[in-house]
Image (cartoon, rainbow, N blue to C red):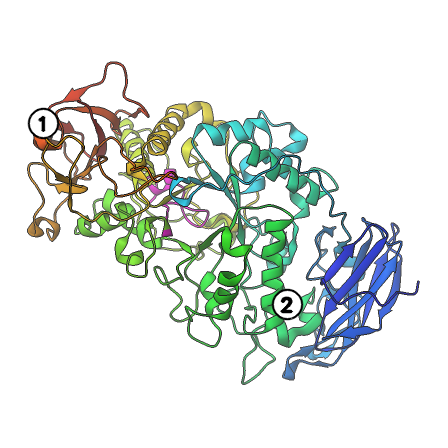
């Protein structure tokens, strides 16, 4: 089969209806072989003789969608200089849009000899490697349109494609754990019920499990081990067409008004450190794609704790990342990205650089700059904790929100002041550079750590199932077991735990910023104290839908508070509070501030804020004038609310403010009883100005002003 010259652009395999163009960048290659595989695994080698701008390319007439392929790259093997070309190793196309098969861990996958690591292994890895696949890019999107939900109106639901649906009884067994399962009406109905406007999917780029996990009978369940940045993970597909199935999932979610955000891992790959396998980038151009130690390029710079870091200083590495992002937006129609260990992408040299080239490219890109961009603002390198320091287009996972809210509800002293910052959008972190409250992605739990149920049930992690003698996972959980470690029959403890679950979830949903709910928390999901379930593809990490009936009241509570937030813009402001008086349309009424803070019996003073023993605080949110306008430039006016937070271990009588703040107050949310109304009930429990409201120990009460 003789190739036509073809084109160096675009990179990857591009089918045009008559044949396929193949293009691969490599500065390290002397020459490149394209390898085609038939249904029996027989391999045909075709040398790509055309090279333009370091891109090896060729066009093959008649090569159709479904064709499996890979590359063999010929060049120098000199680990001491960072050169690791080895034509005995079949390589996945970095631009592969589909991958077929799974990785069969075998010694031939390693580019070096085990008995002589500086010498090249001649064992052929092709029989043990997954293959890249040519895809048909055509798909019927029908009337699909992105919901384009504004940040401040968003409620993000962090989910794992497999773990969320694998045990759902209303999803057909053959669809559970797949993209099609996530798109099933039963799943969409649940997401809509709890007010989710977006699903943030844990990694769906093609990934492989680490060798040491497989050796111990475990796997990389979370998926933070990417090997192909443009291919949807094939194990999550119910059909032989993961690309089409993923697109159909996006289309169905969009029809329901739900956006799709991808958790993406551009900071490292599955090839690991210098002792890792040669699967793709390492064998194509190790020096260009990876950060190597300057003093000894045999070794990899590791800011991620996984063995390697991508070299974002190199233009072709940046091109791979940007091409991947654009592909997922334009062809797969996702609505945003959450960047894992995003500080690594900012490390052009050693320190985290807020103006790194990656961010410049994103900001200048007319496609990527228009979707939701969310940073996990830390990595494991020096100076890697960068909460509050990302550029203006970015929102961030707010780790300080998580820690403060956990501390407040477990009764840690001296948290009132910081709790107020987190509740109101973290202006101390985001206001100075012009960002808004929605720069803060608020969460109390995420995939990494305890669930909400475990947060109130365990003081310590219990990760024995991970096979590392409970050494893995953080010890800084800021949790409280409420009096017993793990499950208990003590009714008092279980009642307190239920109240604490509601406290944490209600606080999350009613804080300024963008709430992110961990899948299953609305059901009371448990991981039995495991706070690092990355390797547990089993009941430890899966969502147990049997809890849906047992904990239906919790789900109803979450839905009620979520819809209260959705219906009232005072809980999802686009601007920070200013603390100045606002005049209502009724000039006979006195002006009161947009926000006000109270102790149980009076307005807060500076002394109260600095009190180390304060456990109770009431906040007034003025809906009369938010200082904002809607899409037609009309002023946004809402109801006003009081939120009474009592983290004290005893019941308290909280005196409501005077008549200037409101003539009457209707009880909307009470975490002590579990009630949560999204609209004022027909016969509400009402209180007058100055009246005392009994707030149960460790509970939250929300009141809406009624006239």
x and y, in percent, of residue 249 in the image: 62, 37
x and y, in percent, of residue 423 in the image: 26, 45
Q: Which residues are magenta?
A: 439-458
Judged from the image, the secondary structure of the residue bearing numbered disc 1 is: loop
Q: Residue reaching furthest right? A: 1
Upstream in sequence: badge 2 or badge 1: 2
Viewer-nearest residue: 312 or 284: 312
Query: Does 621 sit left or right of 55 as displayed?
Result: left
Residue of label 2: 276
Residue at image coords 58%, 61%: 322
| Disc 2: CA contacts within 10 A as few (<14), some (14-19) or many (>=20) | some
**Hey, which quadrant is residue 506 in on the image?**
top left
In the image, residue 216 sits, relative to residue 82, either above or below, namely: above
| Magenta region, main secondary structure | loop
Residue at image coords 82%, 57%: 20
Q: Residue reaching furthest top? A: 683
């Amino acid at each position: 089969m003789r190739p036509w010259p073809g084109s160096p652009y675009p990179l990857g395999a591009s089918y045009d209806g008559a044949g396929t163009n193949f293009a691969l960048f490599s500065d390290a290659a002397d020459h490149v072989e394209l390898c085609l595989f038939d249904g029996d695994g027989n391999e045909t080698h075709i040398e790509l003789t055309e090279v333009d701008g370091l891109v090896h390319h060729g066009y093959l007439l008649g090569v159709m969608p479904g064709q499996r392929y890979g590359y063999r790259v010929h060049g120098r093997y000199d680990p001491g200089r960072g050169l690791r070309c080895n034509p005995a190793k079949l390589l996945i196309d970095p631009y592969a849009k589909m991958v077929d098969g799974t990785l069969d861990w075998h010694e031939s996958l390693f580019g070096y000899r085990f008995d002589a690591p500086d010498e090249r292994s001649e064992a052929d890895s092709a029989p043990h490697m997954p293959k890249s696949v040519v895809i048909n890019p055509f798909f019927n999107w029908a009337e699909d349109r992105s919901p384009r939900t504004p940040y401040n109106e968003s409620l993000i639901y962090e989910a794992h494609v497999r773990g969320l649906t694998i045990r759902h009884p209303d999803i057909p067994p053959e669809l559970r754990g797949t993209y099609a399962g996530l798109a099933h009406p039963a799943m969409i109905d649940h997401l809509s019920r709890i007010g989710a406007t977006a699903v943030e999917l844990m990694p769906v780029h093609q990934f492989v499990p680490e060798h040491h996990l497989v050796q111990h009978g475990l796997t990389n369940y979370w998926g933070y081990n990417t090997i192909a940045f443009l291919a949807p993970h094939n194990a999550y597909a119910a059909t032989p067409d993961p690309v089409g199935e993923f697109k159909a999932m996006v289309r169905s979610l969009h029809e329901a008004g739900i956006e799709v955000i991808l958790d993406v891992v551009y900071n490292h790959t599955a090839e690991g450190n210098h002792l890792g396998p040669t699967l793709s980038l390492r064998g194509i151009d190790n020096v260009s794609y990876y950060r190597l130690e300057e003093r000894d390029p045999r070794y990899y710079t590791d800011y991620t704790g996984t063995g390697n870091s991508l070299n974002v200083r190199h233009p072709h590495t940046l091109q791979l990342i940007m091409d991947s992002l654009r592909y997922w937006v334009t062809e797969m129609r996702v609505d945003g990205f959450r960047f894992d260990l995003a500080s690594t992408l900012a490390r052009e040299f050693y320190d985290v650089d807020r103006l790194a080239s990656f961010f410049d490219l994103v900001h200048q890109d007319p496609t990527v700059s228009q979707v939701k961009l969310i940073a996990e603002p830390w990595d494991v390198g020096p100076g890697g904790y960068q909460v509050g320091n990302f550029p203006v287009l970015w929102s961030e996972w707010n780790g300080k929100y998580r820690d403060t809210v956990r501390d407040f509800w477990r009764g840690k002293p001296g948290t009132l002041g910081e709790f107020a910052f987190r509740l109101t959008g973290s202006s101390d972190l985001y206001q100075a550079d012009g960002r808004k409250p929605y720069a803060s992605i608020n969460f109390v739990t995420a995939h990494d750590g305890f669930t909400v149920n475990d947060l109130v049930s365990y003081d310590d992690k219990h990760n024995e199932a991970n096979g590392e003698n409970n050494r893995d996972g953080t010890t800084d959980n800021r949790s409280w077991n409420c009096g017993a470690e793990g499950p208990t029959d003590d009714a008092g403890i279980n009642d307190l735990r239920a109240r604490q679950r509601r406290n944490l979830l209600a606080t999350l949903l009613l804080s300024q910023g963008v709430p992110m709910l961990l899948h299953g928390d609305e059901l009371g999901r448990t991981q039995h104290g495991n706070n690092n379930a990355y390797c547990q593809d089993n009941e430890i990490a899966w969502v147990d839908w049997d809890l849906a009936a047992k904990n239906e009241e919790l789900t109803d509570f979450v839905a009620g508070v979520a819809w209260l937030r959705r219906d009232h813009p005072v809980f999802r402001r686009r601007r920070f509070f200013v603390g100045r008086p606002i005049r209502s349309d009724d000039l006979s009424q006195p002006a009161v501030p947009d926000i006000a803070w109270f102790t149980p019996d009076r307005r807060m003073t500076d002394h109260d804020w600095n009190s180390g023993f304060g456990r109770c605080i009431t906040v007034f949110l003025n809906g009369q004038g938010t200082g904002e306008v809607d899409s037609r430039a009309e002023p946004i006016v809402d109801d006003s609310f009081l939120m009474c937070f009592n983290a004290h271990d005893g019941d308290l009588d909280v005196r409501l403010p005077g008549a200037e703040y409101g003539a009457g107050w209707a009880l909307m949310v009470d975490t002590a009883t579990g009630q949560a109304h999204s609209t004022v009930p027909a016969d509400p429990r009402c209180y007058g100005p100055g009246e005392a409201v009994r707030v149960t120990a460790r509970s939250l009460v929300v009141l809406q002003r009624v006239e």
